[in-house]
Image (cartoon, rainbow, N blue to C red):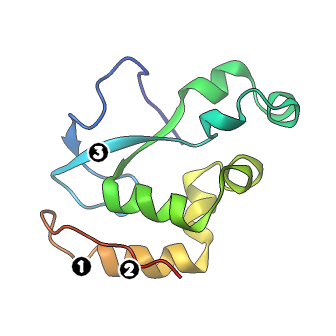
Amino acid sequence: MSKVDADSPIGTDDTTCQFCGRIELSLTRHHLIPRSRHNKARTQRNFSREEMSIDMAMLCRPCHSQIHRLFDNHELANYYHTIARLQEHSDIQKFIHWVKRQPAGLKVRLRYR
């Protein structure tokens, strides 16, 4: 998990994606506990306000989109709320293996089933 300053501008930091490890990409902030779940009683029991607001990962757009393609916000909040747990999933492992070989400037289009 990564603690990211909530006031920093989105997508302006060209660094390394915490998910696939590719470098020199524009990054987006992924809330490890989805914001739509912050007001739910179960989420509030399991996580502190501080955890919900600062637990984020800096991801490239393809990785961020893939996560939201595979999991709904309920699944993300209940189980997949860490980078390690996300990376354990077999579909994510396949995607990371593929996307690591793609050049940073390539526009990745995701297929939906």
Quadrant hosting residue 70: bottom right
The Cα atoms of the two marked residues, 2 and 1, are separated by 7 Å
Of circles 2 and 3, the one toward us is 3
Amino acid type assigned to the residue bearing label 1 in the image: Arg
Q: In which quarter of the image is the N terminus?
A: top right
- Whether 108 is drawn above or below 23: the answer is below
Q: Which residue is drawn at 65% across and 27% down?
A: 51
Residue tagged 2? 97
Q: Where is residue 34 in the image (x, y as percent from the top left)?
A: 62, 40
Amino acid type assigned to the residue bearing label 3 in the image: Leu
Residue tagged 3? 27
**Residue 19 appears in view:** no
Left or right, 39 with respect to 76, comes to right
Left or right, 48 with respect to 85, comes to right
Q: Residue at x 52, y 65 (%)?
A: 69
Amino acid type assigned to the residue bearing label 2 in the image: His
Tags 2 and 1 touching, CB below 8 Å: yes
Residue tagged 1? 101
Marked residue nearer the N-terminal end (2 or 3): 3
Q: Position of residue 14 (x, y in %)?
A: 18, 42
